[in-house]
Image: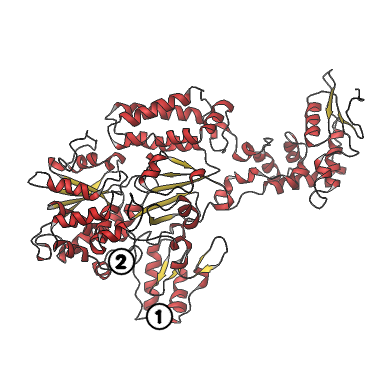
Amino acid sequence: MGSGVVYETLKAEVARQGLRNAAIEISGCHGHGLCEHGPSVTVEPEGIFYIHVQAEDAAEIVRSHLRDGKPVERLFYRDPVTDKAIPYYSEINFYKKQQRIILHNCGRINPEKIDHYIAQKGYRALRKALLMTPEQVIEEVNRSGLRGRGGAGFPTGRKWEFCRKAQGDKKYVICNADEGDPGAFMDRSILEADPHSVIEGLTIAGYAIGATEGYIYVRAEYPLAVKRVLIALEQAQERGFLGKDILSSGFDFTIYVKEGAGAFVCGEETALMASIESRRGMPRPRPPFPAESGLEGKPTIINNVKTLSSVPIIIDQGGNWFASIGTEKSKGAAVFALTGKIANSGLVEVPMGTPLSTIIFDIGGGIPRGKQFKAVQTGGPSGGCIPARFIDTPVEYETLSQLGSIMGSGGMVVLDETTCMVEVARYFLSFTQAESCGKCVPCRLGTKQMLEILTRITQGKGRESDIDTLLNIAKTVKECSLCGLGQTCPNPVLTTLNYFRDEYEVHIKEKRCPAAVCDALMISPCQHTCPVGINIPKYVAHIAACEYLEAIETIRERNPFPAICGRICHHPCEGRCRRGELDESVDIRALKRFAADWYFDHASELPEPVPFPKTKSQKIAVVGAGPCGLSCAYFLAQMGYPTMVFEVLPVGGGMLSVAIPDFRLSREVIEKEIEYIIKCGVEIKFDTPVNVNFTV
């Protein structure tokens, strides 16, 4: 059930119970960032935070909390480690280590009401900027150290300064809200939750460079963002923050909304301008840069949503205040869309230089279900994969670049041990290859060739020469492509080859996917992960059909110790069980134990095991009646070889018998398993040391 239904139900319930001092307001989507816990409700001014709210909860919230002052504890957020109920969102770990600057209004105001924005000091920065000269505004932005939040990280103030000094009878400012990265929703969320901050920043930018017109380029597939931007523009116009003679300053500025068709390449600034001009969105060579010759050949500034929404804060609080946050080279805070194999997904805003470990474990809550962190992919589909050994890397432009990744627009995908890095590279490359405009040969053909090679490797058809070929093509595409898409799209390939080359080699040489992801290289993830390769889906299906004998026979095709492994196996298969992605993994080990126990409980009713026929003339001696020796003897006998096992101890089982305590694995179970192997035709000589005095 969506938030809209909850909102209407809460309003109706407040009216029904006659509460006149309570107002129900819609806040921006993703305002609090804990996306997987919605619909959420925040009660102010206490800051009580409810999650997973449904329409049927409305009556209790209104009656118990709003009327009687007793919060509804069952709807509180619970700490995933301690299971402790946390009533206030400010006390949730997800927020404690964040520093919300750009997102400070998200979730706190109704984005469709300009008075809410003004109450949070909205448009105060515009008033202040209009009392300054354009040069002073640019100087303040330069002092802040603000760098473009769209990925390139170019100093914003310097870009504005270039455009201010550029010759032209008309200038433009464009907000690039064409956010097309899979799993990224930072810009869209700001437009949905705090559109006036972007409008205010865009207007200040227009004043600084001498522009009279601006554009917000946003995808048509984000209808809520478009709707709220249009509402905000109309309200700003009515209040005198846009249009002619803004705030009686003599400055005129108009903003238009251009809805894009969803092409990823239109996120590149020259392609974006071509789209605004109603031409096909294709990049053009630079120079000249847009600051000199941009939209319609006029000097143009293009900044993304996060950059522009930072500007009012800088003007209001001062450039020095903003520069005090972050690192020496990367100032301010950065917003990330934290997704993937993470306990808490959503929008995260932290100071530049915050370690990856803080974002992933302290804020994100770590990897669910106790799995191991493997890597994090930053910067969207063109970003690189950073392995676990660099988990303490500070997140800033230069450090990420040194590791082969990028800041990008702020995507951050967490990967765990169940992730195949070859498939990750193939997945992201399939996206960038499909989105390539095809204008330049390196990107058009290079991405296609890389994708074909990666697809071949994941299908078990890889060749040893493929790794070097991939490296050569990736470097060529990176160095020779026309625009940022082609120059960065090889990053997933280059970083996975650099940090996870062994996975490529296993795929190619052993035709095996260590993470049990590539479908062409396995029957099922559980069977693929099982050290002895038991056909787990088959025996589980037999158990489901009450065919217990068939289940135990299926297990013994690969493992003669079903009862023992049903008790002490470390069951890596369960860690790869796809049911675990939904709720909990199938208890595979318990099912194996059940089938084995059923067999021994009903052994008297079942036919006696028939010894394997001896079809080979060679006799084989096996030294040691431990699990390895007995398994070897069992399968040799199955192949038709007369087999004898020599054991120095008076009992079989090796470490199973002498090292594992009886309460963990009883001797009776071990003896039954060995007895079955003997009945299958394996001979065992106990108290028989194999030494210099021994002869066969």
Residue type indicated by callout 2 = Asn
Residue denoted by label 1:
17
First of labels 2, 1 by sequence position:
1
Quadrant in the rendering for residue 117: bottom left
Is residue 280 or residue 342 the one in the foreground? 342
Whole-percent x and y of residue 156? 24, 49
Residue depicted at x 35% and y 36%: 488
Quadrant in the rendering for residue 524: top right
- Residue 288 appearing in the image: yes
- Callouts 2 and 1 close, C-beta under 8 Å: no
In the displayed structure, 676 sits above or below 372; it is above
Task: Answer left or right for 397 relative to 231.
Answer: right
Quadrant in the rendering for residue 242: bottom left
**Secondary-structure class at tag 1:** loop
Residue denoted by label 2:
110
Whole-percent x and y of residue 6? 41, 66
Q: Nearer the viewer, mark 2 or mark 1?
A: 2
**Secondary-structure class at tag 2:** loop
Position of the C terminus by quadrant: top right
Other residues around mark 2 within 10 Å, as few (<14) / some (14–19) / many (≥20): many
- Residue 379 appearing in the image: no
Position of the N terminus by quadrant: bottom left
Whole-percent x and y of residue 512? 58, 31
Q: CA distance from mark 2 to mark 1?
A: 23 Å
Task: Answer left or right for 123 relative to 648.
Answer: left
Residue depicted at x 43% and y 76%: 62
Say which mark, if any, is on residue 626. Answer: none
